[in-house]
Image: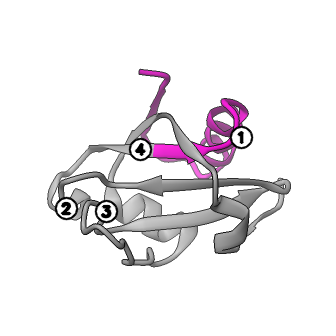
Amino acid sequence: MVVKPAKVSDIVGSCYQGSVTIAYKDLVRIFGKPTTFSGDGKVSHEWMISIDNLPLTIYDYKVDGRKVKNYAWHIGGKTGFVRDALKKVLETANVNFIVGKD
């Protein structure tokens, strides 16, 4: 699986597709430091990534996810397939996580 940063233009039009419960430190280890931009202040940490050319976001919503050991981060994308793609990447990273559809 090819994981790389996604462009903002690739993320436009995405929406909530589920959640992933995982520690902030594990997300940083796997995907690097998050971006911290949000026009409305509702998102304080977000990863914009592409897995095999499937753009997705992982973000906190109305809470600082860093302060919660195992936070249910939101997964954003244009299709529910982003959950499966993220799950495969996290399985190879050997971390504890739960992906949910909500």
Q: Earlier in the sequence, mark 4 or mark 1?
A: 4
Judge left or right: residue 56 versus residue 51. left
The x, y position of residue 67, in whole percent, is 15, 61
The quarter of the picture where residue 43 lies is: bottom left
| Mark 2 vs mark 4, CA separation in Å | 12 Å
Q: Which mark is residue 1?
A: none
Q: Earlier in the sequence, mark 2 or mark 4?
A: 2
Residue kind at label 3, given as amino acid type: Val
Residue to which mark 2 is pinned: 64
Label 2: which secondary element = loop
Number of other residues with Cα within 10 Å of mark 1, as a class: few under 14, some 14 to 19, many 20 or more: some
Q: Is residue 60 above or below residue 18?
A: below
| Mark 3 vs mark 2, CA separation in Å | 8 Å
Q: Earlier in the sequence, mark 2 or mark 1?
A: 2
Residue to which mark 3 is pinned: 43
Q: Earlier in the sequence, mark 3 or mark 4?
A: 3
Q: Which mark is residue 74?
A: 4
Highlighted magenta segment, given as a residue range = 75-102
Label 1: which secondary element = helix
Residue to which mark 1 is pinned: 85
Q: Nearer the viewer, mark 3 or mark 4?
A: 3
